[in-house]
Amino acid sequence: MEYISTRGLPGAPTASFSHILLEGLAADGGLYVPARYPQLDEQILEDWRAVLATAGYSTLAQRVLQLFIDDIPADDLLGICRRAYTTEKFGRPSIVPVDRIGDGPLWIGHLSNGPTAAFKDMAMQLLGEFFEYELARRDGRLTILGATSGDTGSSAEYAMRGRDRISVYMLTPAGRMTPFQQAQMFSLSDPNIHNIAVDGVFDDCQDIVKAVNADAGFKAAYRIGAVNSINWARLVAQVVYYVALWLRVTTRNDQRISFAVPSGNFGNICAGHVARQMGLPIDALILATNENDVLHEFFQTGVYRVRQGSEVAATSSPSMDISKASNFERFVFDLLGRDGARVAELFGERLARDGRFDLSQTPEFAQLADRYGFISGSSTHADRLETIRGLWENNGVLIDPHTADGVHVAHQWLRRVNSPIVVLETALPVKFAETIHEAVGVVPEVPARFAGILDAPRRVVELPNDPEAIKRYIAEHEPAG
């Protein structure tokens, strides 16, 4: 399996999985994608159904991932997956359970039972094992530079903490995360973890990561890598739970289901797109946004319009307070027939100049829903409160505000989607206690592993919204060469 850049021209060099694992962003500013998507058939699906039933999630992960990875031996890949997905880390042997809501068509796929109580653990625990394996093979080191709107940071830091060959520098938007999210990150005392609060919003943090990666000399000297979902390894790990959830909800290999996915940076739902392109029987991919509805606007109108920082609302589902969806480029690459030059123009020159592009009149946009299954909706704070309250009072189910966005938008499409809908859980309610209390009048229980976390000492530095300031900070703490 070879990988290409979303901005590459025909005939451009390809790269292996192990290469793109450590590189993260492509040199031309694009994102890596497989040169082709592996295709599923009836026999593969039947084999996977048996594997999940008898050998469990980690073995299923190895089977799915080996379709995308041919430069890691199968036995080594199985060991990586078994170390990533353990009952100790995820609380249950099933790793990814799924429950039906009452007797209706909605289900919730539980992705948040990992170390930091967020779905990001599903990919990040695997990524940590991948990094350690590959760095040991190369006798190398890696400096991870990441950005978080809430959950990516803690998931990455918990997955990388204590790993001798890895340092983590995580950028956070100052004052934009919940107290629990901040405490999860800033309370870590591991010397390889560095928290940096940036004066700006998540999009500013993400722009800094891309700017530092664009400095080829600095990137090489300090071995800069990525844990955000611009890293293909993060995204392909998420394909696995789409397969697992499909297997757990269906009884036949031709049975189709839909997924409702809270989405800010488009990584989670992009994994669903990949699974659908592979041939997993997915009906609709229902994209749910909060008030920061850049993606919903595109799927409704064909216009992708990036907001300025001052336009990005601070909401009660803060991990989705994003207006520049990095992974959206991967989907547009497929939508436009994998035309790298066209993608480079749209996401490079056009966005830099106009802050928007318009595909509404293209034949590709006209066939978007039929060919790719995407539909969308948005949610408000009032919608989230009503949804949380309704599920709690009627079903005894407590969900976080992001998952509530997904449930609310799924309800909007119930009459037009003729298949079961699995809402992908984003996080446990404990991470958003203030909103939960507002909705239902109770404070969610704090898992024992997080006892006292809000009162723990904090380790975080404040830096300006400036890539050069971030590079200087890294240079002060990391050896070059």
Image: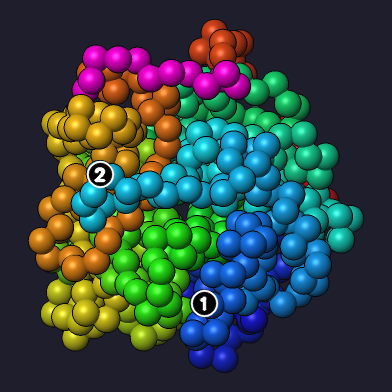
103 relative position to 335: left or right:
left
Compared with 206, 383 (above or below) is above
Image x and y of residue 427, in percent: 42, 37
Label 2: which residue? Answer: 102
Q: Secondary structure at mark 2?
A: loop
Q: Is residue 335 magenta?
A: no
Q: Secondary structure at mark 1?
A: helix
Q: Is residue 158 visible?
A: yes
**Residue positioned most to the bottom:** 11
195 relative position to 163: left or right:
left
Q: Is residue 441 magenta?
A: yes
> Going 32% across and 59% down the picture, which residue do you hit?
259
Image x and y of residue 17, in percent: 67, 71
Q: Are marks 2 and 1 in contact (CB under 8 Å)?
A: no
265 relative position to 357: left or right:
right
Rounded to the nearest whole Å, what is the CA distance between mark 2 and mark 1? 28 Å
Q: Nearer the viewer, residue 243 or 36?
A: 243
> Going 57% across and 47% down the picture, which residue do you hit?
95
Task: Give the tally of numbered discs.
Answer: 2
The kind of residue tagged 1 is: Leu
For mark 1, does the 10 Å Cα neighbourhood hold few (<14), some (14 to 19), or many (20 or more) residues? Answer: some
Label 1: which residue? Answer: 45
Image x and y of residue 23, in percent: 66, 61
State which mark lies toward you, 2 or 1.
2
Q: Which residues are magenta?
A: 439-450
- Is the N terminus in the top left, top right, bottom left or bottom right quadrant? bottom right
The kind of residue tagged 2 is: Gly
